[in-house]
Image (cartoon, rainbow, N blue to C red):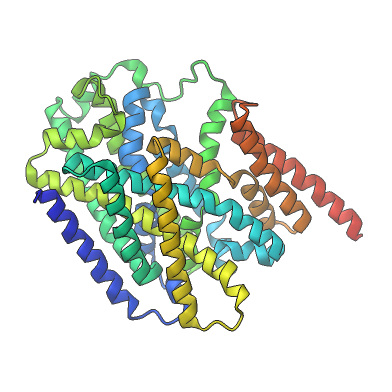
């Protein structure tokens, strides 16, 4: 059997062992969903990093930079690194202090049950698509490092991640994230150093890159609004991401919640420069690559000896699994806690945990179906970050920091943002559908909120 496959199997067994160990301590729904709010700074920061640092950076960002130059790194890693820092500075501590179990709880307690349910409808598609992107990336990596076809790799990814995510909840997720983060950092740094030395040194190799490929802020034929659109998608999409907010709610203090995002964002940027560097060198090292998203695996296979190649494959798989398990856990938690549990008020804690685990399995199967039908990872990631979040970010920020606006304003803004983005993309009404949708949602929220205030006076 291929040594990489043996390495993957050993790694997966470790995940199961951790999940089984943590599962013994799960007695309540909060233990499963929030890790009993016991995550310290070290575990939480590495979990934030590992959850966000998935296939879209290692595979997707390197491919984008290969094709477009440095401007292809706008979303990853620069946009998402900035987003994590912004979340830490703005909303992490205020959200933690409210003591919510899930992000959807905020919409119910600040607005109403109807707003909560609409928020879930808007949150879940992006969450599932994000998971599908990671599952597809797993299939691509396994296809690159072994003889498995893409579909077989996607099936394997789905089975693995569902099985070990179901066991231990957020605490097991965070512990495995820590291990996975170390593997990701080590694997990418080793690959960058080896490739850099082969290409003439880390500094000397960059001198050979064509200058136009280093023009990060080049707008080209687009305008400032298009540049704003590129930055708005990762930043605002991240601010209402249930995967990140789940970690915020699981930390042991408000300061830990804030600092975990800041440290995680810093790690994200530093480690994310590795695939950017490889993407810049890619056209010279592997010219005419038919599938740019295969750049990093192809470089690893070409330049690394077998032992280091196995380490690299483990690092990529670590990044993928650490993201997709978080996606399934946070999405499944929202469905079980905010939709199923209210239908059965007398449900025991044990049954609540079982319901959450069942929802994790269901979401995994849906993500699997999407992964089979998708085309590229980058396309999935951009869709996941923008779908539904235009109205959510407006409602969340107003609701968290002001008392202006009630249920009607929230519902109107969320519908306007979601439908505005969908119409803009479907009918190509504008080149900046996401920014336009946020603007429309903001105007509607203010208008309806003012009307609510007048009617209440």
Q: Picture quarter containing residue 165?
A: bottom left
Viewer-proximal residue among 218 and 367 = 367
Total tally of numbered discs in the picture: 0
Q: Looking at the rendering, in which quadrant would you find the C terminus?
A: bottom right
Q: Is residue 209 left or right of residue 76?
A: left
Viewer-proximal residue among 256 and 388 = 388
- The residue shown at (57%, 24%) is 224
Rendered location of residue 82, percent (x, y)? 46, 43
Rendered location of residue 376, percent (x, y)? 38, 35
The reply to whether residue 397 is visible in this rendering is yes
- The residue shown at (34%, 57%) is 46
The reply to whether residue 247 is visible in this rendering is no
- The residue shown at (14%, 48%) is 310
Q: Picture quarter containing residue 206?
A: top left
Viewer-proximal residue among 76 and 134 = 134
Rendered location of residue 284, percent (x, y)? 21, 20
**In the rendered image of this protein, does residue 418 appear above or below residue 67?**
below
Rendered location of residue 436, percent (x, y)? 65, 34
């Amino acid at each position: 059997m291929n040594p990489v496959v043996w390495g993957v199997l050993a790694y997966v067994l470790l995940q199961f062992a951790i999940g089984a160990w943590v599962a013994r301590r799960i007695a309540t729904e909060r233990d499963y969903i929030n890790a009993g709010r016991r995550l310290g700074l070290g575990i939480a920061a590495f979990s934030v990093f590992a959850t966000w640092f998935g296939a879209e950076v290692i595979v997707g960002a390197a491919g984008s930079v290969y094709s477009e130059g440095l401007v292809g790194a706008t979303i990853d890693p620069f946009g998402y690194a900035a987003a994590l820092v912004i979340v830490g500075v703005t909303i992490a501590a205020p959200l933690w202090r409210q003591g919510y179990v899930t992000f959807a709880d905020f919409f119910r307690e600040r607005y109403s049950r109807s707003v909560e349910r609409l928020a879930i409808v808007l949150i879940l598609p992006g969450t599932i698509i994000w998971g599908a992107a990671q599952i597809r990336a797993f299939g691509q990596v396994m296809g690159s490092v072994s003889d498995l076809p893409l579909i077989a790799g996607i099936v394997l990814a789905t089975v693995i991640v569902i099985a070990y995510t179901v066991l231990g909840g957020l605490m097991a997720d965070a512990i495995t994230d820590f291990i996975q983060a170390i593997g990701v950092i080590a694997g990418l740094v080793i690959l960058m150093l080896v490739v850099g030395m082969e290409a003439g040194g880390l500094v000397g190799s960059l001198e050979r890159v064509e200058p136009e490929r280093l023009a990060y802020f080049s707008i080209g034929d687009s305008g400032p609004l298009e540049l704003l659109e590129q930055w708005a998608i990762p930043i605002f999409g991240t601010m209402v991401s249930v995967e990140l907010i789940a970690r915020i709610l699981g930390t042991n203090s408000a300061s830990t919640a804030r600092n975990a995002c800041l440290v995680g964002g810093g790690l994200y940027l530093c480690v994310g420069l590795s695939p950017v560097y490889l993407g810049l060198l890619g056209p010279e090292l592997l010219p005419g690559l038919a599938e740019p998203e295969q750049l990093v695996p192809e470089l690893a296979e070409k330049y690394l000896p077998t032992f280091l190649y196995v380490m690299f494959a483990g690092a990529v798989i670590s990044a993928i699994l650490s993201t997709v398990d978080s996606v399934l856990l946070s999405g499944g938690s929202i469905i079980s806690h905010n939709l199923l549990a209210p239908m059965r008020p007398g449900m025991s804690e044990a049954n609540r945990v079982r319901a959450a685990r069942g929802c994790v399995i269901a979401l995994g199967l849906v993500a699997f179906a999407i992964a089979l039908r998708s085309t590229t990872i980058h396309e999935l990631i951009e869709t996941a970050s923008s779908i539904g979040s235009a109205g959510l970010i407006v409602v969340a920020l107003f609701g968290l920091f002001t008392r202006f606006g009630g249920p009607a304003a929230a519902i109107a803004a969320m519908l306007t943002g979601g439908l505005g983005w969908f119409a803009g993309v479907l009918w190509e009404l504008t080149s900046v559908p996401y920014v336009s949708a946020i603007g429309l949602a903001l105007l509607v929220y203010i208008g309806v909120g003012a009307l609510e205030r007048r009617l209440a006076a």
